[in-house]
Amino acid sequence: MSGLSENEVPSAWADLSIYIAKNTPANSPTFASRGFGYIGLTMYEAVVCGFPAYHSLAGQLNQLNKLPLPDRNKSYSWVLSLNAAEAFILRSIYIQTSNENKLKIDSLENVIYHFVADTIEDKQIALRSVAYGRSVASAIFAWSKSDGGHRGYLSNFDGKMFYPNGKGSWKPPFFAQQITRLPLHPHWGDNRTFLIADTNWKMPDFIPYDTLNNSTCFNQSMLVYQTNKKITQEQKEIAMWWNDDPSETYTPPGHSYNLASIVVRNKKASMIKAAQTYARVGMAVADAFIVCWRIKYKFYSERPSTFVNEHIDSEWDPFWPDPPFPAFPSGHATQAAAAATVFAGLYGDSIVFTDNSHVGRPRDKVKEVDYKPRKFTSFWQVAEETAYSRFLGGIHTMQDNQVGLNEGAKIGHHINELQWTN
Amino acid sequence: MKQIFFLCFCFIQSVAYCQKFTEIARAAGIVNQFEVYEGSFGGGATAFDFNNDGFEDLFIAGGMAPDALYLNKGNGTFENVYEHSGLKTAMKYITQGAVSADVNRDGFRDLFITTITTKENKGKIPRAANLLFINNGNGTFRDATKEFGLDQLLSFSTAAMFGDVNGDGYPDIYVGNYFNEYSGKLSLIDDAIIVGSKQMAKGNLLINHQGKYFKDEYEDYGMTHKGFGFGGVFTDFDNDHDLDLIINNDFGYKNNSNRLLENKFPEKRFEDISEKMQMDLGMNAMGTAVGDYNNDGLLDYFITNIRGNKFMVNQGKGNPFIDKSDRLGTKINRIIDSDGAYQPVSWGANFADFDNDGDLDLFVANGCLNPFVEPNPDYYFENVNYRFINKSFEKNLVDKGVSRGSIVFDFDNDGDLDLLVVNQKPINNNYSNSSPTLLYRNDSVTGNWLKVQLAGVETDMNGIGSRVEVSVGKLKMIREIDGGSSHSSQNSVIAHFGLGQATEADTVRITWLGGKEQVLVHQRANQLIKITENNNGKGHSKNYWLLLLLPVLLMGLYGMRKIKKRLNKI
């Protein structure tokens, strides 16, 4: 294999995965998170049998009892298996993407295949590896269809559902990110989680609705308002960096998946370690969104803008337009904490690295913010800044963020507790 | 004593009564309500005299409900003659709004109706053509959508406007599309097409070829823009006698913003000058009212929004527009009602001199976003020394229904402008206001007035896009003939001017689209003048210079004293 190391293949597929997530219309953080879960898991399962020290997740995940096994007596090129599996799962999960994007998937698959297969004398090995990778991906895709989120982009909103409308209930925003007046994916919390441990979730505590001046509830929104009114340039940069607007970027879980690529490249991870990183991060963000949505629709709480407009300042608009779903807890915080926890589980918490995920995006002329790379010294610092950005954006209270971080960390721990090695 | 008191009471009552608008829809035979299919889309109307009897009739789009064609019977009432009008193929569609012009120049107004999808096949794909109905001249219409080459243009269209962009006398059409258009076979629909259909859409620039067919020449005219389009207006913002284009887009603060496109006629090109003119407004732009509110000879634009409507004041000669909504008193961010505070959502808007005092007032139709129904009373901004005061309560215009398109026209030909407001049915059945479409008769105490109806010969048959200027002393008032504005609607094509106490207009100057001028002098007040384009080749007509000299001669005859006297009256 000249010019391409097998260790580069996982991140090449991760790059294409976030590209597809970004460039497929009607994507949502929920649907995208689910995609990364299956794409990451597939990558790992397509190669794990080639590495005796590592353990498959078949039998450990929710209703995933078994996956195809390779023929012990025959040789495989594991990178070709990974390559074929990623192409298959990406095409399957994103059947709604454009033909142009589907060609990009074919093209990456072909390029890597030829780089590798052309160096293998026994063509049967190459063909067998491709077939095995596809069989693993096909089994995972078949399993994915029954989780409740399959083709979820066709049912982003439920106009027939009854939504609470009382005091403190979420109201559709006027300064809004989306056209719809309905909340996104109200049934997403009912989806099957990847982890059995995430199936039943103990609901966190929630500060009761109270409009009295200086009540705990009042102060939560007041702090969002006061901070927003005198937001500094640096705070704006933080807010915009983690904005991850689904209609313009690869969504918040995509940002976490890209952080995995940054870490994998930074640590020069081997193919199996890289694949495991994507599997952990993918499932972390996927389960984070399911659990978070379950809590969101349980409490159905309003955004700070609703509270501020009614009780503090009727003309205030948050720094960002409001997203179309209830506030508590922050989905961004939940998935960032889950991702940080699995990163720390694999690499230790402390790491010096630069997040350049949004470098190259043009200056936001309306907000007057440039997208500058951000430096971090630990994974948890990333999670905390991610959460904080929602507060600066004016769309979440500190409570939303703190609870999101707490719950997300639990999800990450559940993933770390799986049996990953023999 | 009792009698005197009673008389006083009656006098007060009658004064109060006379300063108001009176809602008479049901009494006048208009029982109408727009029904939404999805989201909050739709509801527009056009005022057009389809049988040329001198009384303006109405077409109102119905959405899920049937459309309506209201024949103005000339006695203050209307009759819905939709049943035998030939318009019924539109019943298969979910209609949004309508505009009217004489597409084939046969002397009868035709109809263009925007649609978002069909009723039979309400799939996730917007797959309906917009509809063109040609007036048969006998009180009926025929569906000419296919005949005019429009049946294969499948789109999710909100609003359209007529305007002759290429100076051939045939009205062209701009169609504002909200979601992506889709062209292809139904059998080919897959997930990609379904999700792609909810993306921003380009508009259509339908060029009218000699009244025979339309062709979408959007790209040919250099237009590439996409947006969540709510139509816009054809308007000559820079007074160079061609029709430029203002395009409204929803969600412009995070998707593509509003556009101002300058017509480079005689070149076949529109140039995007939105940024330069600071008309790249990032807002939830729903509709536009066009009018010179301060009588400085430059058209200004009121653009409706969710909260904070924009009042874009024209600064002339290449200078950027300035939003003066705050300074002019039209910025309202919150509606405080007896049972709560609500976000105003504005849709239709109309500049009109409702009180005939020589300046333009402004009506704004507000309506909540179905299915989240809450009170959203309309605004009536009275122009007082070129500032605005909301007098909707005093004027009996505080309807809290779910309003969308609004139009002005003089349905009873009494010289003041009446209002039609298309209302949506509230999806929440418990809402206290049943929200029917409203017809407001203008019963204000009014000054004198003048109405001008244009008949183009080389230019558009109804003068759409042409300019009428009426001067009284130093006061010069301009009107641009509307080819579609407000929200998915179109006002009367008859220009209306309030003259205050003046008993005549000193001059009535027509600047036909293209720049040819025609001037009448000393036109007495309180009449409708019909002016036919003087067909004498290019540039100014033969009589133009003669007419221009007339005021000078007349001034000599009458002397300066009379002029001064008249000025004092204004």
Image (cartoon, rainbow, N blue to C red):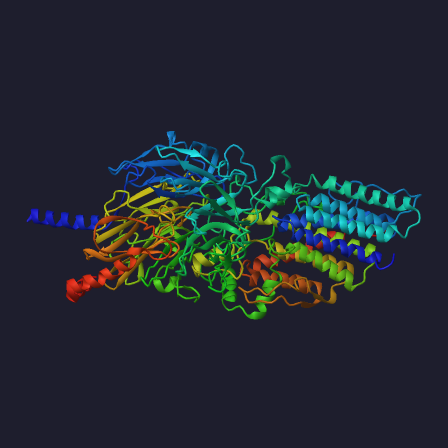
Q: Quadrant of residue B565?
A: bottom left
Q: Quadrant of the N terminus of chain A?
A: bottom right
Where is residue B136 drawn, in percent x and y? 38, 34
Depth check, front residue: A225 or A239: A239
Where is residue A32 drawn, in percent x and y? 66, 50
Identify whether B375 is placed above or below A346.
Answer: above
Depth check, front residue: B119 or A210: B119
Identify whether B551 is placed above or below B466.
Answer: below
Q: Quadrant of residue A136?
A: top right
> Going by the image, does A160 lie left or right of A285?
left
Identify whether A265 is placed above or below B9.
Answer: below
Q: Residue at x 84, y 56 (%)?
A: A6
Q: Residue at x 52, y 50 (%)?
A: B228
Q: Residue at x 73, y 67 (%)?
A: A353
Q: Tell me if residue B425 can be seen.
A: no
Depth check, front residue: B122 or A384: B122
Where is residue B275 drawn, in percent x and y? 50, 63
